[in-house]
Amino acid sequence: QVQLVESGGGLAQAGGSLRLSCAASGSTFSINGIGWYRQAPGKERELVATISSGGNTYYANSVRGRFTISRDNANKNTVYLQMNTLKPGDTAVYYCNAVTYPVVRASGYWGQGTQVTVSS
């Protein structure tokens, strides 16, 4: 079993920044990668970014160049999503997931989500 806990969401103005954290615990040895997903009201959940256990990263076109996914150097079980130049369209609940690699698929391990709201 893997437990994931997100934190760091909140309210930001357009052009601002937020940093999300995802802390994994439990059977972390089984995690091949961590993915950040988001779901806006009335929309399907979408993949935002992923990082593999080897450090390979992927970004959705909508966030590439603005968001950065990284792993804590001291605690490899913590993954961050640095979000810069935020837009109102980034407003969503953000979830982290223990994804499979190399073919990225969401697993059944989800965090509870953290709300990000960007005002114009």
Image: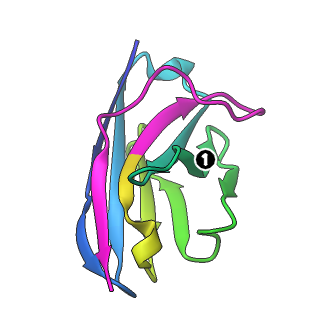
Residue 82 image point, x, y percent: 43, 67
- Image vertical order of residue 14 relative to residue 20, above or below: below
Point out the residue furthest to the right here.
103
Residue at x 67%, y 53% (from the top left corner) = 57
- Residue 76 seen: no
Question: Magenta segment range?
Answer: 95-120
Residue at x 66%, y 60% (from the top left corner) = 60
Residue 103 image point, x, y percent: 77, 32
Q: Secondary structure at mark 1?
A: strand
- Image vertical order of residue 27 relative to residue 100, above or below: above
Judge left or right: residue 41 versus residue 10. right
Which of the image's four quarters has the N terminus? Answer: top left
Residue at x 26%, y 59% (from the top left corner) = 9
Quickly name the residue at label 1: 51
Residue at x 32%, y 74% (from the top left corner) = 118
- Callout 1 environment at 10 Å: few (<14), some (14 to 19), or many (20+)? many
Figure label count: 1
- Residue 46 seen: yes
Judge left or right: residue 77 versus residue 31. left
Judge left or right: residue 68 versus residue 74. right
| Magenta stretch holds residue 111 | yes
| Magenta stretch holds residue 21 | no
Residue 71 image point, x, y percent: 48, 51
Q: Mark 1 belongs to which amino acid?
A: Ile
In which image quadrant can residue 6 be found?
top left
Point out the residue furthest to the top here.
1
Which of the image's four quarters has the C terminus? Answer: bottom left
Which of 48 and 117 lies nearest the eye of the viewer? 117
In which image quadrant can residue 14 be found?
bottom left
Point out the residue furthest to the front here.
42
Which of 48 and 76 lies nearest the eye of the viewer? 48
